Amino acid sequence: MDGNDRKKRARKKRGLIAALALALLAAAFALWAAVFYRADAKALAALGSDEAVTVEETDYGYFFDGPGDEAALIFYPGAKVEETAYAPLLRRVAEKGVDVCLLKMPLRLAFLGMDRAEAVRSGYGYARWYVGGHSLGGACAAICAAEHPGDFEGVVLLAAYPTKPLAGDMTELSLYGSEDLVLDRARLEAGRQYAPDESEELVIEGGNHAQFGSYGLQRGDGEAAITPEEQWEQAADFIAAGLGRAA
């Protein structure tokens, strides 16, 4: 075997090793993503329609249509959380006058569908659009808003923070629970440098990370001192009032 043959065999071996490593990484990622927080019975019950809110399953996720017709919020779910887990909160937001488009994300990871909000907007005729989300979903929503400043009036961040500057004329609503042990407080503080001039913050006393949704306990979270219903109601009041003032 001459030198060229040995080099070819070495390159082929390196290529096979690299391909195997990539396959193993892909398999490990798929297994990791397959374990996620599932919507509970309360969340599934909130998907039903009534006289106050009509809930419709769509190609992008779910649409919560309440009495308002001027403003809508596009919502990004948290990482590895089933999107329907946010139905109880988002239903309350719609009841209070801000319709909501809840997005499904690939593998329940918002960073794999960062720009999905852009496609949703074209299907409706609202005068004002907002984008927001929970945890990683909120951070991804903030990136979308930062990269498309002319398309959104503001952002709603639930236990989340921006990582890029938001346009100065936007509105930012930031909410988190006092017992949240998942939220990185140092990054929350660092994110304040990117907030627009019009920003409001609500610390929900007794609230935690997981109770913005309805999917049970989350690993590493603090114990809530209020009920999920109390946390949803406080959050929905703050969101609806804040976006109403932004009109």
Image (cartoon, rainbow, N blue to C red):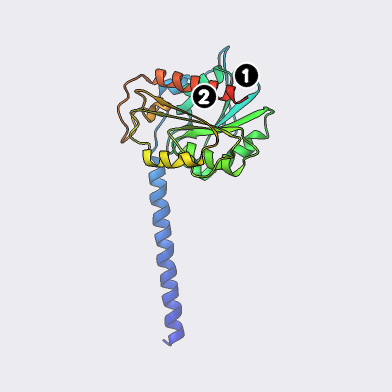
**Residue bearing mark 1:** 68
Q: Nearer the viewer, residue 57 or 113?
A: 113
**Residue bearing mark 2:** 239
Quadrant where the N terminus lies? bottom left
- Residue 184 appearing in the image: no
Q: Nearer the viewer, residue 42 or 244?
A: 244
Q: Which of 115 and 146 is in front in this view?
A: 146
Quadrant where the C terminus lies? top right
Name the residue: 67% across, 32% down. Answer: 123
Q: What kind of residue is marked 1?
A: Gly
Q: Quarter of the image holding residue 215?
A: top left
Name the residue: 33% across, 28% down. Answer: 179
Structural crowding at the residue carrying mark 1, measured as other residues with C-alpha within 10 Å and reported as few (<14), some (14–19) or many (≥20): some
Name of the residue lying farthest toward the right: 125
Q: Is residue 180 left or right of residue 44?
A: left
User: Total of numbered circles in the picture?
Assistant: 2
Name of the residue lying farthest toward the top: 51
Question: What is the CA distance from the residue labelled 2 to the residue labelled 1?
Answer: 14 Å
Mark 2 touches mark 1? (CB < 8 Å) = no
Nearest-to-viewer mark from 2 and 1: 2
Q: Mark 2 or mark 1: which comes first in sequence?
A: 1
Q: Is mark 1 on a helix, strand or loop?
A: loop
Give how far across and how far down residue 235 sits, in percent. Answer: 46, 23
Structural crowding at the residue carrying mark 2, measured as other residues with C-alpha within 10 Å and reported as few (<14), some (14–19) or many (≥20): many
Give how far across and how far down residue 238 sits, in percent. Answer: 49, 22
Name the residue: 44% across, 20% down. Answer: 234
Q: What kind of residue is marked 2?
A: Ile
